[in-house]
Image: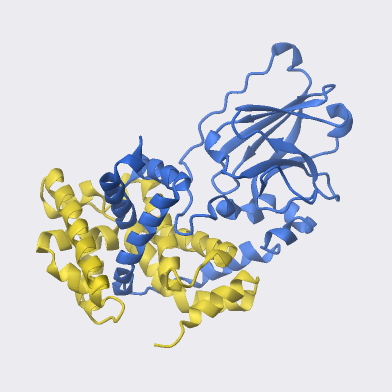
Amino acid sequence: MELHRKPELQQRLAAEFALGTLRGRARQRFRSFIAEDPALAAAVQDWELRLAPMVAAVAPVQPPARVWRAIEERIGGAPMRSDGIWANLAFWRNLGLAASGMAAGLLAAIAFIAPQAPSPAPAPVVVRVPSGEMAATYLAVLSDPKTQRPMLVVSAGRSSNELWVKTLDPAIHVPERSLELWALPPGQAPKSLGVIAPSEKMTALKLIAAADQALAEVPALAVSLEPAGGSPTGAPTGPVLYTGPFLKYW
Amino acid sequence: MGADPLVALLAACAQSDRAAFEQLYRQTSAKLFGVALRIVRQEDLAEEVLQDCYIRIWNRAGDYREGLAAPMTWMASIVRNRSLDWLRRANPEVIDVDGEVIEATASEGPGPLAALERLQDGTALARCLGELEAKQRQAILLAFHDGLSHSELAKHLREPLGTVKTWVRRGLARLKACLGARAGS
């Protein structure tokens, strides 16, 4: 849909998005348009500001104390700024817990838009692996820790020095940023495995050695959001978006 | 009106200041919980929404731009968006189409419009809402405060879906024109 050619429709949908009457799939689709169109994001924001004073009329309700305790727990385990996260090994022990909410960075450019809600049940993932190689494959399904939705599948034959990355949802790519894949060896700094190509569904990444040597001791993989082209420092600099255990499938 | 103290708290949160974050929570959580509760209409869901939103606020405090919106506006937008997303997956059976829960909560305290009129910031919006036809105003207030979709509005107001959609659309267009005219004058 070429929304930018229909300014009236654009305005109307922006208003209904902000008001809340744009629902379900239409809401999710519109959100993806917003992510690609700064003018549309601005229109939504204008509407949010127009309607915002109505919030003042909402009666406050004291939330139970357990809400704050849960929030504290979630921010308590690790420094929340992205530069500190990777240095903290305790973080990896609570991977799913601590990384939740970090997908926030994905939409950092759109200050007012919340992320897509978790789907009720993740769709089944079908991975086709050539039957001859099935007996000896490293496999990881990386998911969004918050929604548990699988987003990428990573695989490598034991003796292969190529790692295959399949993107399950092309919408994970962020304009002018790169998604970088990391190995998380225990007790060591994350090691870059390369940048995931933005347009192709499958990316092949070269390993420094056969998977059996390069990755045998790696229990988990993660994907972080980095500047275009990948982390400039060789260590992750952006938020952790997807994580998953790296398994030996044989 | 002096500077909003929440601006400084958000700035401190952006520097990972946990004490400031706790302050921010103490000062804003009741209002934001109210916002979430009105929309999702289930305490446990509203608690979860609130939790997620504060984590998001903590992580993204650095994205807040003072010139753009008041801190409460920024935070409430996050909560409203999250709440509306949760509604999508909520059990349809708990959706209060008959409006019993809505009527119950709506009867507490002054109506949204009356409350709006008492507020400095809300004056222009309250006046413009006041200039709408009653049906348009009611539809917009219900949609905003209670997170009612078009079809829920239609059931609640006992009117055809198309009619309700038109009220909302025309109401929003008139609201924009009215607010725009005021900003210009």
Residue closest to the eye, B24 or A174: A174
Where is A162 relative to B105, above or below? above
Drawn side of residue B24 relative to residue B46, left or right: right
In depth, the one of A27 and A142 nearer the eye is A27
Q: Where residue B114 sits in the image (x, y, percent)?
A: 20, 77
Q: Residue at x 44, y 61 (%)?
A: B78
Is B28 positioned to the left or the right of B12 in the image? left
- Percent from the top left, x then y, of residue B169? 19, 52
Marker count (numbered) = 0
Q: Residue furthest front?
A: B184
Residue at point 53%, 29% (across, down)? A124
For the colour blue, the matching chain is A
Assign the N terminus of chain B to one quadrant of the image: bottom left
Name which residue lies at 79% across and 56% down: A89
Drawn side of residue B139 relative to residue B64, left or right: left
**From this viewpoint, is residue A137 visible?**
yes
Instruction: Name the residue nearer the viewer: B81 or B124.
Output: B124
Q: Position of residue A123 (x, y in %)?
A: 50, 32
Q: x and y percent of residue B12 in the render?
A: 60, 76
**Residue A142 location, quadrant:** top right
> Image point 27% across, 45% down: which residue?
A9
Q: Quadrant of residue A102?
A: bottom right
Q: Is residue A37 above or below residue A44?
A: above
Front-lying residue, A19 or A76: A19
Q: What is the drawing colour of chain B?
A: yellow
